[in-house]
Image: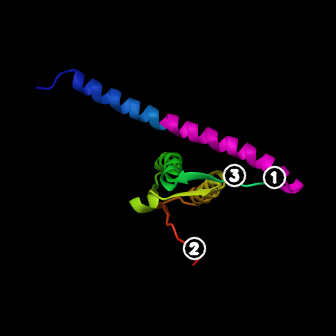
Amino acid sequence: MPTPMKPANKLLTKNIETSQKHFKIGKVSTTMMLSLTEDILDLAKMQSGTFTLNEEPFVVAALIEEVEYIFEFQCARKGIYFRVDADQQTKAVRFNSDVGRLKQVLLNLVSNAFKFTDRGGITVAVRVSRGFD
């Protein structure tokens, strides 16, 4: 027999999940703004010849997750789909690179796709290659 608490519990759980998703989007967006500010400063470093890359270890899945959190919600509001095509093996890959630069390039590409996609959706295919083909 259903109790009056079950619908309230479902609603509360849904609200918590929605709030967590919005918090994550805000966190990632703040990180993007910080990155943009750093990019402006990096331009000055490039002009002065003191620019360096910040290599650090990271897992591909973390980069994919950030992009998904930002664009899934925006695409859903626009009425288009957003998918990332990456198998578990690819998501588990760890390597050293400037993750901030990779994220910036990926976000710019997806942002442009978002701007110019009015129907259907966006699919980002992620593959890892061991060399230059």
Q: Residue at image x 71%, y 46%?
A: 36
The answer to whether the residues at label 1 and label 3 have Cβ atoms under 8 Å apart is no
Are there few (<14), some (14-19), or many (20+) residues within 10 Å of tag 3? few
Which quarter of the picture shows residue 47?
bottom right
Q: Position of residue 19 (x, y in %)?
A: 45, 32
Residue hosting label 2: 131
Furthest-right residue in this view: 48
The answer to whether the residues at label 2 and label 3 have Cβ atoms under 8 Å apart is no
Q: Please identify the quadrant where the C terminus is shown.
A: bottom right
Q: Position of residue 9 (x, y in %)?
A: 28, 26
Residue at disc 2, secondary structure: loop
Are there few (<14), some (14-19), or many (20+) residues within 10 Å of tag 2? few
Residue in front for this viewpoint, 59 or 6: 59
Please say whether residue 39 is one of the residues in the magenta stretch.
yes
Q: Position of residue 78 (x, y in %)?
A: 50, 50
Q: Residue at image x 51%, y 34%?
A: 23
Q: Nearer the viewer, mark 1 or mark 2?
A: 2
Residue range corresponding to the magenta coloring: 22-50
Residue type of the residue flagged with mark 3: Asn
Q: Residue at image x 59%, y 75%?
A: 132
Q: Residue at image x 23%, y 21%?
A: 5
Question: What distance separates the C-alpha of mark 2 from that of mark 3?
Answer: 21 Å
Q: Which mark is residue 54?
A: 3
Residue type of the residue flagged with mark 2: Gly
89 with respect to 103 (left or right): left
Q: Which mark is residue 43?
A: 1
Residue 11, above or below 35? above
Question: What distance separates the C-alpha of mark 1 from that of mark 3?
Answer: 15 Å
Residue type of the residue flagged with mark 1: Leu
